[in-house]
Structures are given as structure tokens and as C-alpha cells.
Image: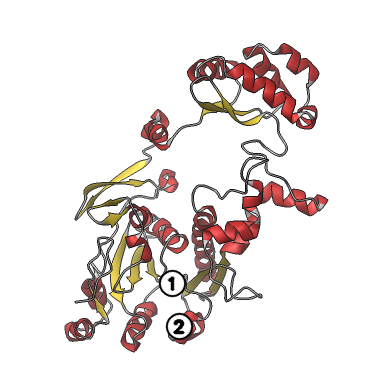
Amino acid sequence: MKPLSGLKVLDLSRVLAGPLCTMILADLGAEVVKVEPPWGDETRGWGPPFLEGESAYFLAVNRGKRSVALDLKRPEGQEAVRRLAQEADVLVENFKTGDLRRYGLAYEDLRPLNPRLVYLSITGFGHTGPRAQEPGYDAALQGYTGIMSVTGEPEGPPMKVGVAWIDVMTGMMGALAVLAALLERERSGLGQHIDLSLFDVGLFALANLGESFLLTGKPPRRLGNAHAQIVPYGAFPAEDGWLVLAVGNDEQFQRLCQVVALPQLAERFPTNAERVAHREEVVEALSQALKARPRAHWLARLKAAGVPAAPVNDLKEAFQDPQAEARGAVWTLPHPLLGALPTLANPLRFLSRTPAGPGLPPPLLGEHTEAVLLEAGFSPEEVRALVEKGVAGKGKGRGEKGKTP
């Protein structure tokens, strides 16, 4: 038994933040129904890479769900969602502010039908404020929230994080918000609306850099792989690759200098404050020393000396790390088109009694339309009528736009 077994989630979201949120809930046992338009979630067509027409992007965040293809622009599709929402515990959506109100599917519309419904809205900027009507894209939000201004080399251009960083964190925060609302529902018996924005999450995630600005009024500058308050802390070149040093205290720095045969560096800059003040000199001296030997040479000696260090792995090396294998970092699921499908394992798999675990593979477009609607109380005749009108059905899937049969 998983912790969320029996919980019913209606997923009206697409792309990344919302689908990641609902996949986390599915891994924890929730029954997730993903409502897609007849042409599918946009990410079904985002690639390459594709495998048998299925996009890696879609496969990454839609494990454990059943797909229902419904056209929400049609009154019959809207009514179908209302009927599904009456039996749901949670609804997740990431439409632009006001879009679902036009369809009669906003929280205010559904609350009278299901007062216990927890309704999570994910938008770029939230439902209030001067930017509420603007669309939200991760790259744009990385610009708005300032993370790009502190990412990249000091003399280079601003850089975005290599993954859709704010989207991913918003998905995780969304799952946390849903769980908090469900816990409160146990006391009050009532659901509530959650207004979660990428903008708010992006600002919150600035953490120590954001707090440093609030205290000083000075925007932090880009430091490349370095740390604003710790030296040495970042990536350094070895003879045949890169490694990371994460020297968190003065004793570790003393041991590091012994390993790389730079005792004079430890004598000149014994405290972190002194090293931060002379960042360039310290980093340059260490870089020159580390370039003289292969990465494996340094990592073995740094580990023996108790100095925190790690290789800068590519993804192949990361997934081949023995720790990844020992911890089961990949879940393999049987997919109807792809056979054995490797997927990223949920880190919540280590709850001692009720761990997260894989369920269904990512669905084909509209794969479960008929089954879900019948389970929700639609008659076979009603389902047939929705399909014949083009309101519901099964699209082509496989990363292509398709017409509903």
C-alpha cells in the first residue's frame, strides 16, 4: 500500500511543472487521470529525441497516469470534466489566469459541486498582480527572477540553468502544497484553492543569494562555478577532466593544500574570509596544481584526506555511478510501444513502510478515455456520442497531432 492509495487526481496540466507534480502524486499511489486535448499535451511533439514516435520529454513526467482525450473548448467536454471533478480529491491545472473560468471550470465553478476538492493552479505569475495575465515560460521566469543574472562566468553573458529549473521546483512545491491542503482537509472537511506561480517559486529558490541582497541591497554577481561565500568551492580542471571541490571549513583547506603540495597557500589564507577576499589568487593556484595530474589521481587522494571532492560527470557517468545502481535510480516499466522503458526513479522511494513506486507507464494519447468515462458513470451511449461528436476519443499519439476518431 502506498501513502496516497485511493486518492483521485484530475490532471488538466501539460508541459512540465504540472505533470511533474501529478507524477509525484502517482508515484505515491494516487490514481491520476490526465485530461489532454485530442491533439495531446504539447510535449508529445517536443523532440528529438523520439523513440517509436514517443518523445523523451513527455515520457519523463507522465508515468503512472491514464490519458483521457477531451476537447475543453466544447460544452460537452467541459461537462465531462465537471462530472470527473465531482469524484476527484485533487485537480491540477496550468491554464493561463482566467482561461478555465471561460469554460466554467474555475475553482469557483467546481467548489459547489465538490467542496472537498483541492484545486491547484500553476501559472507564470499567479492570479493577482500586474503580470497575472502574462504567460509563464521557464526561460522567461529565469530572467524575471534573477537566477540568470547569477549564472554563468563573470565576464560572460547571463545563462539559464541547463534544465527547466523553476518548472521542476514548481512541480515539487505543487506536490507539497497539495499534500498540505489534503492534511488540512482531514481537520476541516473542506478543500481549497492553491495559487502557485513560477515567479514566486523562482524568487523563493534564490535562498542565500536572495537573502544576501535583502540584507545589503547589492545584487550578487556571476561567479561561474564558484560560491559567493565559500572558497574554494566549485569546478576545477584536472589533466583529463573536471572535478568539484567543496571545501567547507578551514581544516579541510589545510588538508587540501597538503594533497596538492601548496602549504604556502594554507599559510597565507588560513580562513575562509581571507580566501573569499583573495578568491582569484586562491583559485588560480589550485587550478594550476590540479592540472598536473589526472582526475582519478586527485579524487583518490582527496577522498583519503577527507576533502570533499567529486567528478564532474556527464549523464552517462552519472547513471553508471555505483551509487546510482545501488540506490535504484532507474525504474523500468513495460510500455505498449517501447517495450522496457527506463524512467527516472522517484527519490521518495525510501519511505520505510510506504515507499513511492512505479505504476503505469506514460500513457498513449487518449489510451484510457473510454475506461475512465465508464468508471465515472458515463453510459456506453454517452461515451459513444462524445466520440462521434469529436469531443472525446483517442488521437494518434506518438508525438504527432491527430484528429479524434
Label for residue 91?
A: 1
Front one among 389 and 192: 389
Dots 1 and 2: beta carbons under 8 Å? Answer: yes
Dot 2: element? helix
- Three-letter residue code for mark 1: Leu
How many residues crowd around disc 1 within 10 Å: few (fewer than 14), some, or many (20 or more)? Answer: many
Please give the residue where the numbered disc 2 appears in the rendered image. Answer: 110
**Location of residue 226 in the rendering, given as x and y in whole percent from the top left corner:** 65, 35
Front one among 380 and 36: 36
**Location of residue 257 in the rendering, given as x and y in whole percent from the top left corner:** 68, 16
Q: Earlier in the sequence, mark 1 or mark 2?
A: 1
Identify the image quadrant of the C terminus: bottom left
- Three-letter residue code for mark 2: Leu
Residue 111 appears in the picture as rendered: no
Name the residue rendered at 43%, 85% in the picture: 103
Name the residue rendered at 76%, 48% in the picture: 212
**Location of residue 402 in the rendering, given as x and y in whole percent from the top left corner:** 25, 71
